[in-house]
Amino acid sequence: MLELIEYYNIVLILTVVVLVRFLSLRVRLHGEYGRTEKIVLKIADVLFEEFPEVIGVESVDSWDGANLRVIVSRDDPDLIDRLMESIYRIIDEHGELGNIIPEIVRVETKDAV
């Protein structure tokens, strides 16, 4: 199910509901829908396909400069390395190194992998 909602031409929220172990995955885009947002969607698509531990992807404006938050159910070092490798591969393919800065955060869920 794909749902597009536009609020006052400022915030575009894209909700992608995928049944994976009964989790709902959500991708949120803030601001205009442009090149960066399209790359974030590509990153989300790859991460959701390759990593069952990824439960969300959001574009954010973090205090430390990060603008892409990847939400995971566990955060062991090997998983983080593989995630970052995949993320930076996609960012590099689109010539956006330095423009898209990821952070990985773990969220406790009762259904966590």
Image (spheres, helix red, strand yellow):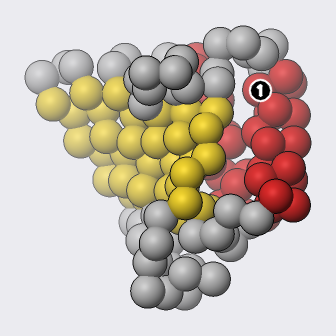
Q: In which quarter of the image is residue 74?
A: bottom right
| Residue 108, percent from left and from top | 46, 72
Of the pair 69 and 9, the residue shown nearer to us: 69
Q: Mark 1 points at which residue?
A: 91
Specify whether 11 is left or right of 85.
left
- Dot 1 lies on which element? helix
Q: Which of 28 and 113 is in front in this view?
A: 113
Residue at the location (66% across, 52% down)?
A: 45
As rendered, which of 25 and 63 lies closer to the eye?
Answer: 63
The answer to whether residue 83 of the structure is visible from this angle is: yes
Give the side of residue 8 with respect to residue 21, left or right: left
Residue 96 position (above or below residue 16): above
- Quadrant where the N terminus sits is bottom left
List x then y, in percent, for residue 66: 55, 25
Residue visible at 44% across and 78% down in the picture: 109
Apparent side of residue 27 relative to residue 8 in the rendered image (left or right): right
Which of these two is toward me, 52 or 110?
A: 110
